[in-house]
Amino acid sequence: MTVLESIFLGLLQGFTEFLPVSSSGHLLLAEKLFDIEGGLFFDVMLHVGTLFAVVIAMRHTLWQTVRHPVASKKLLFTVVASIPTFALALLVKLFVPEKIMQIVLPIGFALTIVLIVLSDKLAKPRFRLEEASWASVAVTGITQGIAVFPGLSRSGSTISVMKLFGMNGSDAAEFSFLLSVPVILAGAAVEGWEAFRSAITTPWYCVVIGIATAFLSGLVSIHMVMRAVKTKSWIWFALYLAVPLVLSLIIL
């Protein structure tokens, strides 16, 4: 792996992890288009970089949630939503072949576009995160679990679903970022165990550069999402997704 490849993959992971465009879908396309693959250990380290990004960006919310776990519903909502997420992710990992994951890529991109458009046109913000119903939290967790399929954006689908339930855009994005913490941790743990059993061939300096790039681009993408949900620019992500959708139909 070269330094430029590590920077490219770090940027790709950092931006697409939080932007509503599907990180797994973009990584699949990158592998097909450029024949670049960092290896399992490198992928784990990129996830660590994005984890640092969301922890830094959400540090005040996370600190308040940890300090007041009973008074604030955020921690309980995160736990409840994560249960169906992990259950569905485990079922997919155990029973869905890798070939199927690639075949459904265009469908995932298309579904993300539909969810973003619907949430942009139909959503009517009525409540804050603390006022969310248990049904909306559970459905968001189920949606996040389904988003393990490439092309279906985790952040895009969870934010859109919560907006459709009536949550304001800023709180929907905040909840999506909170949900990403256990998801990234679990993914890094599983992949890390697999990477531990395999040979590590990526140069250490490429790993460091990849982590730093994923961290910095992750911070930028979180800021972009928070800005987009407060303005009228959310729909632009749906327009952008037409590009990877067409590419996936051509090359896969």
Image (tube, rainbow, N blue to C red):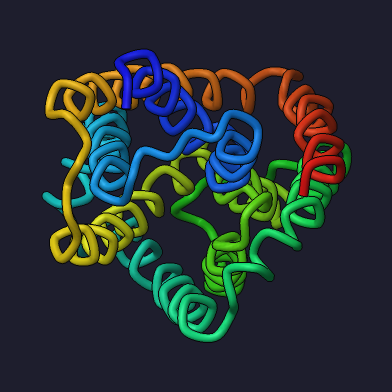
Q: Can residue 168 be spotted in the picture?
A: no
Residue 178 location (% of width, % of height): 37, 48
Residue 117 location (% of width, % of height): 84, 39
In the image, 169 versus 196, the foreground residue is: 196
Residue 106 location (% of width, % of height): 80, 51
In the image, 187 versus 56, the foreground residue is: 187
In the image, 242 versus 136, the foreground residue is: 242
Residue 54 versus residue 91 in the image, above or below: above
Residue at image location 59% in from the left, 52% down from the top: 158
Residue 22 location (% of width, % of height): 60, 43
The answer to which quarter of the image holds residue 191 is: bottom left
The answer to which quarter of the image holds residue 20 is: top right
Residue at image location 55% in from the left, 45% down from the top: 155
Residue at image location 52% in from the left, 78% down from the top: 88
- The count of marks equals 0
Quadrant containing the N terminus is top left
Left or right side of 106 for 81: left
Residue 201 versus residue 92 in the image, above or below: above
Left or right side of 57 for 204: left
Q: Can residue 31 be spotted in the picture?
A: yes
Residue at image location 30% in from the left, 37% down from the top: 46
Residue 24 versus residue 202 in the image, above or below: below
In the image, 145 versus 252, the foreground residue is: 252
